[in-house]
Image (cartoon, rainbow, N blue to C red):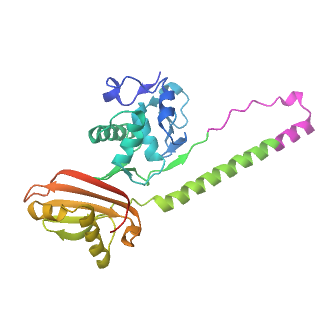
């Protein structure tokens, strides 16, 4: 019997992962993988099962619910890379035909952290980027796990000596191929991490103020780009300047480089309201523009 890790949600969810891998296959577009996490625990993204490396008794395995499994599998597909909240909600809930929420996502992240902490001593296993999303800590070792197949013992007494030596040749070749494949996979994972390991949204840069509104972005901008960004924001949200004259807010924005050059691209900005004299954010309204270009 598998134990359900997400005990707080087991009674609310109609289907546990045991016997329901068909549901998971219908939703998860990532390839199924086995991972060795922190050189301690083996995780199967298809079944959502965890088991300590070298454990003999399979009954000791613990299994995630389908929703928790989809979240963790998504984060482990690119350790260190920030997954935006809306992307997680889309891939985990909306792809299943369910309506997700930030509250549900926060609850599942909290439960995953608690479950993983049983095997992993690191305190920051799943890292949150405020108002953006989450990423799996890239400092924690995550490598593909390939389980060696069981081999039948050779019947030495029934095989001539020269035949036994000949049978070892394919075995040596196969072992060499397996070692080469593992080496290629390890190098590929290492190369991927070198490119994607730094979270894109780990630092916020102030870009001045617009009336009572503080402007922030996640990239350094030159003076010309700042001026250009204000023009773009005024075009995409004509009422923004007037709103910032009457009430304080914090505006987070990101503009693709080609938009600055007059070509089509994507724009994102979130207007987060504040109480006067307070630093706490009340709520945020997000706006996305696709294939947008300056007039």
Rendering quarter of residue 160? top right
Do we see residue 250 in this rendering?
A: yes
As for residue 52 lying within the magenta part, the answer is no
Name of the residue lying farthest toward the left: 277
Q: Is residue 121 left or right of residue 41?
A: left
Rendered residue at 11%/65% (across/down):
245
Residue 290 in the figure: left or right of residue 45: left
Q: Position of residue 234 (x, y in %)?
A: 23, 66
Q: Residue at x 50, y 24 (%)?
A: 59
**Residue 79, x across and y down, in percent:** 45, 51
Which residue appears at 73% of the width and 45% of the height?
A: 175
Q: Position of residue 5 (x, y in %)?
A: 39, 30
Quadrant hosting residue 203: bottom left
> The magenta stretch spans which residues?
147-169
Relative placement, left or right, of 169 versus 65 is: right
Q: Residue at x 43, y 46 (%)?
A: 75
Above or below, 213 against 15 in this view is below
Residue 2 appears at what percent x and percent y?
Answer: 46, 24
Front in this rendered view, residue 247 or 280: 247
Number of marks in picture? 0
Q: Examine the rendering and report whether any part of residue 130 can be seen.
A: no
The quarter in which the C terminus is drawn is bottom left
Q: Nearer the viewer, residue 279 or 38?
A: 279
Q: Nearer the viewer, residue 57 or 277?
A: 277
Above or below: residue 62 compared with residue 109: above
Residue 163 falls within the magenta-colored stretch: yes
């Amino acid at each position: 019997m598998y134990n359900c890790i997400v005990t707080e949600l087991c009674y609310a969810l109609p289907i546990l992962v045991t016997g329901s891998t068909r549901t998971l296959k219908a939703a998860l577009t990532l390839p199924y993988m086995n991972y060795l996490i922190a050189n301690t625990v083996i995780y199967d993204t298809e079944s959502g099962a965890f088991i300590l490396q070298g454990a003999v008794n399979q009954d000791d395995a613990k299994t995630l619910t389908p929703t928790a499994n989809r979240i963790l599998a998504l984060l482990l597909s690119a350790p260190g890379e920030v997954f935006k909240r809306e992307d997680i909600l889309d891939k985990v809930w909306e792809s299943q035909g369910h309506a997700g929420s930030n509250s549900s996502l926060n609850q599942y992240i909290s439960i995953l952290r608690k479950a993983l902490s049983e095997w992993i001593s690191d305190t920051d296993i799943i890292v949150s980027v405020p108002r953006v999303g989450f990423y799996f800590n890239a400092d924690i070792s995550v490598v593909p796990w390939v389980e060696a197949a069981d081999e039948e013992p050779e019947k030495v007494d029934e095989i001539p000596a020269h035949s036994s030596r000949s049978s070892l040749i394919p075995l040596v070749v196969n072992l060499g191929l397996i070692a080469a494949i593992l080496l290629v996979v390890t190098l590929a994972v290492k190369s991927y991490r070198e490119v994607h390991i730094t979270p894109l949204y780990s630092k916020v840069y102030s870009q001045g103020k617009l009336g009572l509104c503080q402007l922030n972005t996640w990239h350094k901008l030159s003076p010309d780009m700042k001026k250009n960004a204000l023009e773009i924001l005024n075009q995409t949200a004509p009422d923004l300047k007037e709103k910032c004259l009457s009430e304080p807010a914090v505006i987070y924005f990101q503009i693709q480089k080609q938009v600055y050059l007059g070509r089509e691209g994507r724009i994102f900005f979130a207007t987060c309201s504040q109480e006067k004299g307070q630093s706490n954010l009340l709520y945020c309204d997000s706006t996305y523009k696709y294939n947008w270009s300056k007039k």
